[in-house]
């Protein structure tokens, strides 16, 4: 029996996972466009907080912990920008 299909199977799995992630992001974008920040903001905060807690609970390098913190700060900045934009749009 040959393992020659293993890389192809793994590539196909990675592509499916990628497509599922893209669909999830698109779904989230539609959700935050259709709902007020007061509803989705706490949900997003919970996800970010859980990711930070998980990162802190493992034996990760200082560089990795810093990377996670930087990503979380970027997410929060985008959230704040989105909230500001939504507020401006609602006042027009």
Image (cartoon, rainbow, N blue to C red):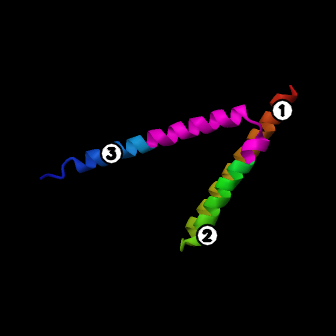
In the displayed orientation, state which residue is furthest to the bottom: 59
Quadrant for residue 8, please give it. top left
For marks 1 and 3 on the same chain, the one whose residue lies earlier in the sequence: 3
Q: Position of residue 70 (x, y in %)?
A: 65, 58
Q: Residue at x 74, y 39 (%)?
A: 82
| Secondary structure mostly seen in the magenta stretch | helix
| Element carrying mark 2 | helix
What residue does disc 1 label?
A: 88
For the residues marked 2 and 3, what is the alpha-carbon distance in whole angstroms? Answer: 31 Å
Q: Which residues are magenta?
A: 18-41
What residue does disc 3 label?
A: 11
Q: Nearer the viewer, mark 1 or mark 2?
A: 2
Relative to 43, is 27 above or below?
above
In the rendered structure, the answer to whether residue 6 lies left or right of residue 48 reads: left
Quadrant for residue 46, please give it. bottom right
Dot 2 surroundings within 10 Å: few (below 14), some, or many (20 or more)?
some
Q: Position of residue 69 (x, y in %)?
A: 65, 61
What residue does disc 2 label?
A: 56
Which of 81/51 is in front? 51
Q: Is residue 69 visible?
A: no
In the rendered structure, the answer to whether residue 58 lies left or right of residue 18 reads: right
| Element carrying mark 1 | helix
Q: Residue at x 59, y 36 (%)?
A: 27
Q: Is residue 50 visible?
A: yes
Residues at badges 1 and 2 in contact (C-beta under 8 Å)? no
Q: Residue at x 78, y 34 (%)?
A: 86
In the displayed orientation, state which residue is furthest to the top: 92
Relative to 70, is 41 above or below?
above
Q: Position of residue 66 (x, y in %)?
A: 62, 65
């Amino acid at each position: 029996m040959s393992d020659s299909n293993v890389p192809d199977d793994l590539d196909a799995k990675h592509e499916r996972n990628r497509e599922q992630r893209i669909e999830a992001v698109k779904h989230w974008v539609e959700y935050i466009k259709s709902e007020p920040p007061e509803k989705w903001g706490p949900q997003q905060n919970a996800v970010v907080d859980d990711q930070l807690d998980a990162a802190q609970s493992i034996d990760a390098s200082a560089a990795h912990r810093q990377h996670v913190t930087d990503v979380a700060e970027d997410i929060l900045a985008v959230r704040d920008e989105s909230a500001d934009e939504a507020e401006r749009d609602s006042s027009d």
